[in-house]
Amino acid sequence: MPPSDDEVTFERLSEMLAGFMRTQALSVVVNLGVPDAVSMVPTDIAELAVRVGAHEQSLYRLMRFLASEGVFAEVEPRRFTGAALSKGLRSDARLSARWLVLRQARSSIAAGARLCIRS
C-alpha cells in the first residue's frame, strides 16, 4: 500500500527540518574537536566525552544522530569510530570541510535571526 498524502507531506517536512539539525550537529562536533579525537579504534563515549570536555549523555545522543547520517560509526553500544565523512572534518585532513561547517552554521543562525517577514 503506497503512503498517504499526509505521510508523504510529513516525511518531506521532516527531511527539510533535518537539514538545519545536520548543520548544527556538525558544527557542535567540529567546535568540540570530536573528529580529531575519534579514530578507527572504537572509543567509548565516556572516554570521548572526557577528551573533548562534553556532557556524556548529550554527546552520546549527538554521536548517534551523526552515526545515523554516516559521519561516525557506532560499532558497539556506546563505542564509536570515525568514518569517511568524519575524516573530512579533521583539522589534519588534506581537504578539510571544517571551515565550511563553521561558516555555514554561523550563517544559518544569523540568517534565521534576521528573518522577519511581519509588516
Image: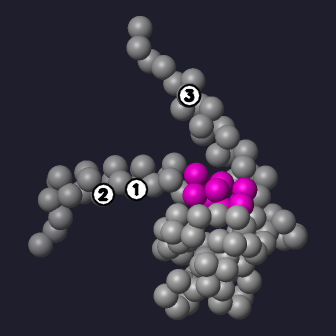
Give the residue furthest to the top.
119
Total number of numbered discs in the rendering: 3
Q: Are discs 1 and 3 less than 8 Å apart at CB?
A: no
**Residue pictured at 72% horizontal, 49% vertical:** 102
Question: For mark 3, what is the residue?
Answer: 113
Question: For mark 2, what is the residue?
Answer: 11
Q: Is residue 26 magenta?
A: yes
Judged from the image, the secondary structure of the residue bearing numbered disc 2 is helix
Q: Badge 2: few (under 14), some or many (20 or more) residues near its Cα, within 10 Å?
A: few
83 on left or right of 9: right
**Residue pictured at 60% horizontal, 79% vertical:** 45
Taking the image as drawn, is residue 73 in sight?
yes
1 on left or right of 71: left
Q: How is the image coloured?
A: one colour
| Residue range corresponding to the magenta coloring | 23-32
Q: Badge 1: few (under 14), some or many (20 or more) residues near its Cα, within 10 Å?
A: few
66 on left or right of 33: left
Residue type for callout 2: Glu
For this rendering, which residue is in front, 117 or 49?
49
Residue type for callout 1: Glu
Q: Are discs 1 and 2 less than 8 Å apart at CB?
A: yes
Q: Quadrant of the N terminus?
A: bottom left
Q: Main secondary structure of the magenta part?
A: helix
Judged from the image, the secondary structure of the residue bearing numbered disc 3 is helix
- Measuring from the top left, give residue 69's x and y in whole percent: 52, 70
Res 15 label:
1
Mark in the foreground, 1 or 3:
3
Q: Based on the displayed image, in which of its 4 quarters is residue 39 positioned?
A: bottom right
Q: CA distance from mark 1 to mark 3?
A: 22 Å
117 w.r.t. 104: above or below: above
